[in-house]
Amino acid sequence: MHKIDFNDRWVFIKEGKESYIEKEIPDGEYITLPHCFNGIDGQSGDGMYKGKTCYQKKVALTGEELREYHYLEIGAASLVSHVYINGILAGSSRCGFSMYRVFLNPLLKEGENLISIVVDNSRFDDVYPLMADFSFYGGLYREVSWITTRALHFELLDNSRDGMYITQKAIKNGIYELKIKGSVINELHNKLESKIKVTLLDKEGNGVLSKTMKCAVIEKEEFEFIEELNQPRLWQGIEDPYLYTLKVELYQEEQLVDERNLEIGFRTIEITPDKGVFLNGKPIKLNGVSRHQDFAEVGNALTKEHMELDMSLIKEIGANSIRLSHYQHHDYFYTLCDRAGLLVWAEIPFISVPSTADKENQNAKDQLERLIKQAYNHCSIYCWGIQNEITIAIENEQIYEMVKELAAIARNLDAVRYIAQANIHSVANESSLNDLTDFVGYNLYYGWYYKEMKDLAVRLDEFHKVRPNIPVMVTEYGVDTNPVLHSYTPSVKDYTEEYQLLFQENALKTFKEREYVLGGYVWALFDFGSEIRNEGGTKGKNQKGLVTIDRKIKKDTFYLCKAYWSKEKFVKLAGSRFVNRHQEENDMVVLSNVNSVKLFVGEKMIGERNDHEPVKIFKGVKLAHGENFIRVEAVDSEGNCYYDEMFLNRVKDMDLSYVLKKTEEKTTVTNWFQKFDLTNVQEVAIKEGYYSTFDTIEELYKNEEAKAVFKKYFGDLAENPQMATMRGLMTIDSMSKRSRFNIPKELLSVINKELNVIEKRK
Ligand code: GCU
C-alpha cells in the first residue's frame, strides 16, 4: 500500500448545488485540508452555518496508473458526506467522526477525473449527535489520502484502519499472548500464493519475535498468529509508556507488496469495585481530563501541531488518563496517548437523546463499530464508552435495550476491553441501566447545576453502598469559568477563577479519600465551542476548561491539578489575574507540589510552609496601597529552587470588571413555579384516553387545549432549540425528574387536574 497526502488545492464552496456533483465549481475558494467551515461561527454564539457544502479536486491518471488499485481515504467529514467520482456516487458516510475509504477503480478514467465530496452538517434525525452541548462543526476536517495498492494487500474496506487487529493479554506469570488477526485481499480473484511475516521489534529495533505464515488468497483470506512472549517490558502508563513495534509484511513470491508498522504496548488493566484500578497489578487512581477536539478559530480542523500542543499541556498537568469525548478523535491523537502512557476512555456520540427516527439505532451501532475497529490497535484505550447522558429527556426500557445492544456489539468486536457508560446524575443508583456495562461513570455537577459541592461525596458514597459490586468513577465534573472574573467570596454561578479552584479542590480531595472511586475526568481540559451557550460573559463556548479554547490562558485550576498530579516540580501563585484588590487583607493561595514554600511581599518574607498540601494558603496578607510585588519561593529536598511572582494593585474601590453583569444570565430554568399555589394539592388518578403528564410534549402540542396547559406552566420552554429536539421524548413527568427544571411533585397533580380532562381524539 502506498499512501500519499491528498490535501492541497481543493476547491470549496459553502453551498450544495446538485450540479457540483459532476460539474466544476465555478467560483470556489482554494483551501487545504483539514478544513472546517464553522471555525469562526461555530464558536461565536451568533448562529452557525448548517447545510450542504462541496469540496472538489481534479486528478489526472495515466493508463498505466489505472492498472493499479486506488482508494480514497477520508479522515473524517462532518456530519454526513458523499463522494462522487466523475459525477457518480462512489461512497458515503454518516459517521462524521470516523475514517472511511472508497474504492475508486470502477469509476476512474484515463486523463482527468473530478472528485466531488458533498459534506453536510445539517441536522439529520438519524445521525448522532442529535443534541449536545458542543458545536456540530462541518467540514472535511481531517486529512484525505490517496491509497494505491498492488493486487495483493491487507484489507482496506472492512471499516478498520489497519486491516488487522492486535490483541495482547497476560496469560500466566509474566507470559503474554500476542494475537494478530487480519485479512488479505486479492483484487485479481485468482489464486495467489502469499506469505505473511510478523516481527516484533523493541525500541532499539532488535527483533524479539519473528514468525512467517503461508497464505493462499483467492478473494479474501483471513490470517491469525497467536504467539507467546515471555516477560515483555510492560507499558507502564505515564511512568514508562514502553512500546514495541509490530511489523507485519505481506509478500507475493518473495516480493514485499504491503506492510504495516504498528506500535504495541503490553499491559494489564483491572478495574475493581472496591479498590479502584490496577495497571499491571499496581493501583492507579485515574487523574483524568476530558478533551473535545476543537480549537479556537479552526473548529475541528486540527493539524498535528494542534494535537501535539494539547498533548504537551496534558503532560504538563500530569494527568494519567483522558476521556476523549464525545466521539471518535483523530487517530494521531490516540497514537500520542499510546506514546504518552495515558489511559484512554474512547466513546461514541450516543449522547443526550436517542433517535426516534432510527428505531434500530443503526447510526450509533455504525459509529461504535468504526470507533472500535479503527482504534482497536491503540494500547492506551482501556474502555469503550457506549453512551453519555442518553437519559437526559427520559429513562425507559427502550433506552436500556439500545444500551444493551451497543454493549453486546462492543463485546463482540473487542472481547478484552472494558465497556463503560457516562450517566447523568438523575440516573438512580438502583437503575438497571447501571447493570449494563462493566463499570459506570457519573457526570456529577454538585455545586454547579444542583445542590452543593459537598454532595459529590455523599452521592458517591450512596452509590457505593447501594451498588458495592459496580466500579464507579466521575466521568465529568466542572464549572464554567471566565478568567477575567474574580471574587473574594467565590460562589456558585459567579464564573470566577476562584470558584473553579474551590470546586476542583473539593472534587480531587473527594476522589483521593475514597479508594473505591476509580478517579475522575475533569470537564474539561479546554474550553470548547458550544453554539447554544451564552453565559459567564461569553457566547458560543462552554468555559469549563482549565485552559482557554485558544490554549493561551491556563486558569489557576490547571495548576491546582498539576500540584496534585504532576511529578514535575513547580510553584504557582493563584490569583495573578485578580490584579486590583480593594481589600487590605488578602489570602494568598500557593499551588505547588514542593513541600517547603516561602511567601514574600516586596523584600519581606511574610510566611513559610512546609507540608505536603498542594494548596497552601497564607491568610490575611496585608497589601500596601498601589503596587505590591508578591513572590513565592519553593525549595525541594534536593535544594532546587522554584519561583513565581505577580504584581497586585491595592485599589480603593472594588474593580467591577471582575463581576459578571447579571443581565444575560440564568439561562437555566429558575423557580417560576413559586407563583402557583401548591398547598393542599390532592393526587389525581389518571384516566385513560385523556391527556396527562405522561404524554410527550409533542403529543400535548398536537392538541390546542393541552398545548395551552403546557404553555401556562412552562411558557415557551418547548420552543427553545434545545428542548425542541426533545419534544418527541420528554414528558412533564420526565422533566420533573431533572433537577434543573425544579418541578415540585405537587405541581404534577395540579397540571394533571387540568390535562386529564382533555380527551384524546381517536
Ligand atoms: C454534560 C455533558 C457535556 C456538557 C456538560 C456541561 O453533562 O455530558 O457534554 O458539556 O455536561 O454542562 O458542561
Image (cartoon, rainbow, N blue to C red):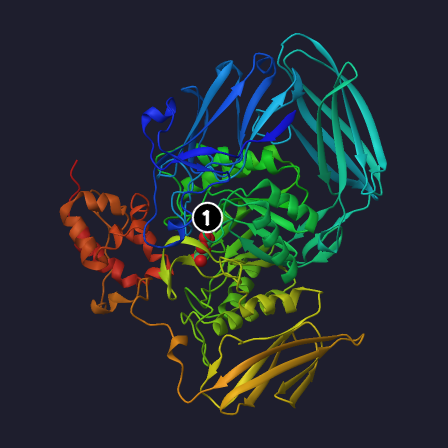
Quadrant occupied by the C terminus: top left
Q: Amino acid at mark 1?
A: Gly
CB of mark 1 near ligand 1 (< 8 Å): no
In terms of depth relative to the viewer, which is nearer, 246 or 28?
Answer: 28
Residue 302 in sight: yes
Query: On the rendering, which quadrant does ligand 1 occupy?
Result: bottom left
The total of numbered circles placed on residues is: 1
In terms of depth relative to the viewer, which is nearer, 526 or 283?
Answer: 526
- Among the 4 quarters of the image, the one containing residue 257: top right
- Among the 4 quarters of the image, the one containing residue 284: bottom right
Query: Residue 213: where, in percent of width, then height?
Result: 79, 20
Q: Is residue 14 above or below residue 290?
A: above
Query: Residue 588: where, in percent of width, then height?
Result: 57, 82
Q: Please indicate whether residue 349 sits to the left or right of residue 231 in the image.
A: left
Q: Please indicate whether residue 297 sits to the left or right of residue 377 in the image.
A: left
Quadrant occupied by the N terminus: top right
Residue 108 in sight: no
Q: Residue at x 56, y 64 (%)?
A: 461
Q: Secondary structure at mark 1?
A: loop
Query: Residue 665: where, in percent of width, then height?
Result: 32, 66
Are there few (<14), some (14-19), or many (20+) residues within 10 Å of tag 1?
A: many
Q: Is residue 342 above or below residue 123?
A: below
Query: Residue 351: where, in percent of width, then height?
Result: 44, 46
Q: Which residue is mark 1?
A: 299
Q: Please indicate whether residue 147 sits to the left or right of residue 38 in the image.
A: right
Q: Please indicate whether residue 318 sits to the left or right of residue 461 in the image.
A: right
Q: Residue at x 52, y 34 (%)?
A: 8
Q: Residue at x 46, y 88 (%)?
A: 583
In terms of depth relative to the viewer, which is nearer, 33 or 1?
Answer: 33
